[in-house]
């Protein structure tokens, strides 16, 4: 039995891209979301069974990629990444859920394996990736990438309670649990692996 169900988060407004559906924007000849789905299929260790997409519009376009597509269950449309986490947990039939965003087309092919290794080693409930980021001043720091998250499926009740109380921030929820942080900052790690595209200009620059 495969251990992990994966969900690609494509439910955002794409406001910094002028309101376009970000997951359907082309990158190297394919929609961004297709890159994410392919990289999930290519993960080392064959840990991932089913992959699905969380989207709130253009559902048929996403379904045409051969995966199940689920909108946010929240009445507040575009309720943020945690709504996508919850959508995945509600439909997760394996012990773990891996979340990845649709706008980071080069994420590591050993993402699932390394997050799982850390989660087990640290007896954690959640494993979160972190990666080097360079700020406007040219300073590089390793920062958490909370939308790249491996979590135990049994955390669904906790997330429901958090969101019902008005919580929306990923780190505020994960802080309630034991979290393993996994740095993708070694010499062998691609510095572009966690580059995400928020604008069409960034998309073209990454190409």
Image: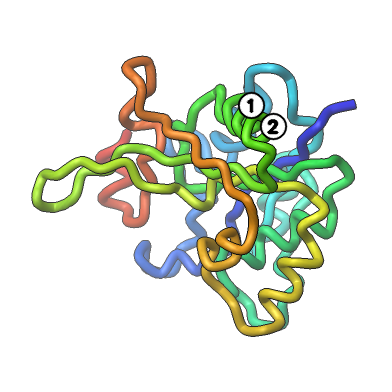
Q: Is residue 31 above or below residue 13?
A: above
Residue plotted at (83% across, 41% down): 95
Estimate the spatial distance between the alpha carbons at disc 1 and disc 2, rounded to whole Å: 5 Å
Secondary structure, mark 2, is helix
Q: Are marks 1 and 2 in contact (CB under 8 Å)?
A: yes
* Whole-percent x, y for residue 179 in the image: 58, 48
**In what quadrant of the picture does the C terminus appear?**
top left
178 vs 160, nearest the viewer? 178
Q: Is the residue marked by circle 1 packed among few (<14), some (14-19), or many (20+) residues within 10 Å?
A: some
**In what quadrant of the picture does the N terminus appear?**
top right
Residue at numbered disc 1:
117
Left or right of residue 199: residue 67: right
Q: Is the residue marked by circle 2 packed among few (<14), some (14-19), or many (20+) residues within 10 Å?
A: few
- Rendered image coloring scheme: rainbow
Left or right of residue 144: residue 83: right
* Whole-percent x, y for residue 183 in the image: 43, 33
Left or right of residue 59: residue 92: right
- Disc on res. 120: 2
Q: How many marks?
A: 2
69 vs 187, nearest the viewer? 187
* Whole-percent x, y for residue 172 in the image: 53, 67
* Whole-percent x, y for residue 200 in the image: 32, 53
Q: Is residue 172 above or below residue 111?
A: below
Residue lying at the far left of the rendered structure = 137
Q: Is residue 76 above or below residue 143?
A: below
Left or right of residue 117: residue 106: left
Residue plotted at (32% across, 41% down): 142
181 vs 60, nearest the viewer? 181
Secondary structure, mark 1, is helix
Residue plotted at (71% across, 41% down): 6
Q: Quadrant of residue 82?
A: bottom right
Q: Quadrant of residue 94?
A: top right
């Amino acid at each position: 039995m495969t251990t992990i169900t994966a969900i690609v988060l494509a439910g955002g407004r794409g406001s910094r891209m002028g309101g376009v559906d970000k997951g359907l924007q082309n990158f190297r000849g394919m929609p961004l979301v297709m890159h994410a789905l392919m990289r999930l299929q290519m993960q080392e260790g064959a840990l991932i069974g089913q992959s699905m997409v969380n989207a709130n519009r253009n559902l048929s376009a996403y379904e045409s990629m051969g995966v199940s597509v689920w909108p946010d269950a929240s009445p507040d449309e575009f309720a943020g990444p945690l709504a996508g986490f919850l959508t995945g947990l509600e439909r997760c039939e394996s012990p773990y859920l891996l979340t990845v965003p649709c706008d980071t087309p080069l994420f590591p092919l050993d993402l699932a394996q390394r997050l799982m290794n850390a989660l087990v080693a640290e007896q954690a409930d959640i494993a979160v990736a972190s990666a080097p980021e360079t700020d406007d001043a040219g300073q590089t720091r390793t920062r958490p990438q909370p939308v790249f998250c491996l979590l135990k499926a049994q955390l669904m009740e906790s997330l429901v309670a958090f969101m019902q109380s008005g919580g929306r921030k990923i780190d505020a929820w994960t802080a309630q649990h034991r979290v393993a942080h996994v740095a993708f900052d070694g010499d062998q790690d691609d510095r572009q692996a966690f580059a995400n595209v928020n604008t069409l200009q960034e998309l073209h620059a990454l190409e």
